[in-house]
């Protein structure tokens, strides 16, 4: 058995397919994108990281309990190695060439996103993008804001998604911010600094004494309308997940007055908040 | 906001500092202090700590969340060999670092934290002390096997749990190996290299054409009895999860012949494999 199959080659490195992450080798260091038909848990990530390839693509194996089958993405992110996984149902496990030919990306880490890799992209294209991109230094944490305008409201107001309320800007005083940290007391100074027209954050899993939503009432007196989404349904740290996957779990009086209700999809709640009467 | 860090304990190695938010990290924490934060321990707060990497970090698990996102920072920290642990969100007041120190119960941890002696179920203040007073190891990927003997029969055959079939040893020819990688064609190659008396691996989420369990027929042809567990129930890369959480999803004829059945608990199946007439 040939441990690695070369699928594409250029001066800067190759796209190499292999049946298992254990077959990533010293020859791949700093050069190659390794398309390996293993899951991308922490264990295979340890083996991949020792060889420091240019990029890595594995299989999501259905994500698994606590995300264990893809947790290697976050391990490799800390080392600034672009990494992504393919939906397990698109590929043959243990067949690296098949993963390259038929895989469709389901999850990616930030360095991979920075290379232009996207969810839904064929593995072969993701591998080419990883090979073509200059690795670069890790951006400062504050620069990984993933800011995106998702809806234009009346009077120039927008619904803006970003990963943390800490990334709010002065201009967001007129916007609805959809973010992904909890809404406990430590979020309050950030909310009051930005003073968004409306906000949706995570309930953080609520915690003891509903501490994860305590901020809702604290900012109400300051005129801020806000709600939280259920942290079991939307990924913390991912503002777009709050918007797309979020289900409202708690609201303050000002948000309720605008029609926001528990159980409502976050996108609908954001729409109501951006149209509320000032 | 004057006092953003509260010193809970100090030794000559550093201090245990309680923080309401991971964003309150300071340059002098670098390499010395254990930070007990009332932030979730996702990748985003892990990035915030990257600039001033502390000795160790504790956050809350946010109820784990979709794809484990609310605690995925544990794996980010592991890549940097930083001990990190999460506390059960329902044990703490979100946004109150001192409360996390006093009331938090550890729910998940990474390998460097385990090296320091931290265990699930432990109070956060005890985990923080262990992280302050102990250094993590610096093992290679091949050294993190988590090998444990779960059972031994009178004839000396053992049920061995380890995180991957590649960690199987010469002695395992007489043992039943319970591991946590998929059972595709590449898994089968590793199994046949070890030739255990019996095995239980993951089905890897099955994949296209049930490729994640293709190794069952291959090994059956070579006289090796084995079965897979459902990857949606047991964490890949964690042999103990296969043993404790695993539910059999498929078995080869040799395993079926000794009574292993789909839907059976993995621990029960392992015992049947152990007692199979050789």
Image (cartoon, rainbow, N blue to C red):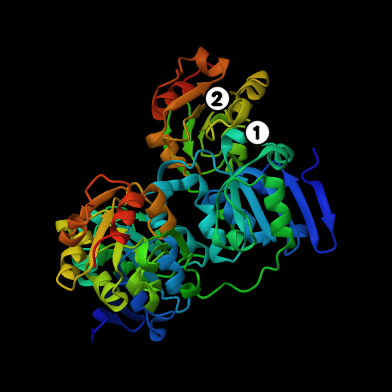
The residues tagged by marks 1 and 2 sit, at their Cα atoms, a distance apart of: 20 Å
Q: Position of residue A225 (x, y in %)?
A: 23, 64
Q: Position of residue A119 (x, y in %)?
A: 57, 49
Residue appearing at x 41%, y 76% in the figure: B54
Pick out the residue farthest to the top: B257
Q: Position of residue B231 (x, y in %)?
A: 48, 35
Q: Which residue is mark 1?
A: A92
Q: Position of residue A201 (x, y in %)?
A: 31, 60
Numbered-mark total: 2
Residue A71 vs B16, above or below: the answer is above
Q: Residue A206: in sight, yes or no?
A: yes
Query: Dot 2, crowdedness within 10 Å: few (<14), some or many (≥20)?
Result: many
Verify CB contact (< 8 Å) between mark 1 and mark 2: no
Residue A25 vs A143, above or below: the answer is above
In the rendered structure, find residue B226 and report the number of the disc placed on it: 2
Residue appearing at x 51%, y 15% in the figure: B256
Identify the chain of the residue marked 2, using the numbered disc in the image. B
Residue B55 vs A31, above or below: the answer is below
Pick out the residue farthest to the front: A155
Q: Nearer the viewer, residue A269 or A33?
A: A269
Identify the chain of the residue marked 1, using the numbered disc in the image. A
Viewer-side label of 1, 2? 1
Residue appearing at x 51%, y 38% in the figure: B179
């Amino acid at each position: 058995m040939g441990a690695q199959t070369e699928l594409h080659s250029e001066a800067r490195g190759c796209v190499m397919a292999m049946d298992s992450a254990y077959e990533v080798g010293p020859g791949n260091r700093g050069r190659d994108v390794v398309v390996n038909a293993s899951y991308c848990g922490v264990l295979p990530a340890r083996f991949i990281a020792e060889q420091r390839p240019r990029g890595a693509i594995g299989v999501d194996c259905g994500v698994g309990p606590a995300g264990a089958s893809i947790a290697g993405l976050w391990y490799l992110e800390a080392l600034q190695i672009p990494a992504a996984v393919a939906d397990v149902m698109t590929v043959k496990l243990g067949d690296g060439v098949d993963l390259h030919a038929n895989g469709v990306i389901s999850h990616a880490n930030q360095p991979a996103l920075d290379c232009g890799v996207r969810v839904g992209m064929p593995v072969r294209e993701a591998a080419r993008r990883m090979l073509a991109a200059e690795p670069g230094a890790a951006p400062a944490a504050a620069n990984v804001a993933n800011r995106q305008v998702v809806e234009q409201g009346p009077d120039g107001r927008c619904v803006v998604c970003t990963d943390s309320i800490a990334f709010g800007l002065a201009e967001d005083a007129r916007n609805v911010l959809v973010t992904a940290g909890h809404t406990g007391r430590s979020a309050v100074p950030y909310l009051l600094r930005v003073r968004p027209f409306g906000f949706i954050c995570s309930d953080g899993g609520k915690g003891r004494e509903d501490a994860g939503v305590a901020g809702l009432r604290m900012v109400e007196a300051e005129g801020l309308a806000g709600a939280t989404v259920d942290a079991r349904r939307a990924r913390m740290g991912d503002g777009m997940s709050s918007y797309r996957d979020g289900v409202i779990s708690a609201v303050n009086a000002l948000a309720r007055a605008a029609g926001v209700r528990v159980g409502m999809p976050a996108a609908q709640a954001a729409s109501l908040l951006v149209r509320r009467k000032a | 906001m004057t006092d953003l860090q509260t010193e809970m304990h100090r030794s000559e190695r550093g201090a245990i500092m309680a923080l309401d938010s991971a964003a309150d990290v300071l340059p002098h924490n670098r390499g010395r202090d254990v930070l007990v934060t009332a932030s979730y321990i996702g990748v985003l707060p892990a990035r915030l700590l990257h600039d001033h990497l502390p000795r160790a970090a504790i956050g809350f698990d946010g109820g784990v969340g979709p794809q484990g996102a609310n605690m995925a920072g544990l794996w980010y920290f592991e890549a940097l060999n930083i001990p990190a642990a999460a506390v059960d969100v329902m044990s703490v007041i979100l946004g109150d670092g001192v409360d996390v120190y006093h009331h938090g119960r550890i729910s998940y941890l990474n390998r460097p934290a385990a090296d320091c002696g931290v265990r699930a179920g432990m109070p956060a203040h005890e985990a923080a002390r262990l992280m302050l007073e102990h250094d993590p190891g610096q093992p290679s990927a091949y050294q993190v096997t988590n090998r444990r003997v779960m059972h031994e029969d009178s004839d000396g055959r053992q049920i061995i749990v380890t995180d991957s079939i590649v960690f199987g040893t010469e002695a395992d020819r007489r043992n039943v190996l319970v591991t946590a990688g998929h059972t595709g064609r590449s898994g089968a190659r590793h199994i046949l290299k070890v030739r255990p008396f019996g095995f239980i691996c993951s089905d890897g989420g099955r994949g296209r054409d049930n490729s994640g369990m293709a190794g069952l027929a291959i090994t059956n042809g070579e006289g090796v009895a084995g079965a897979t567990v459902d990857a949606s129930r047991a964490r890949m890369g964690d042999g103990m999860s296969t043993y404790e959480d695993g539910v059999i999803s498929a078995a080869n004829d040799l395993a079926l012949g000794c009574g292993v059945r789909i839907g059976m608990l993995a621990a029960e199946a392992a015992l049947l494999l152990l007692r199979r007439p050789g």
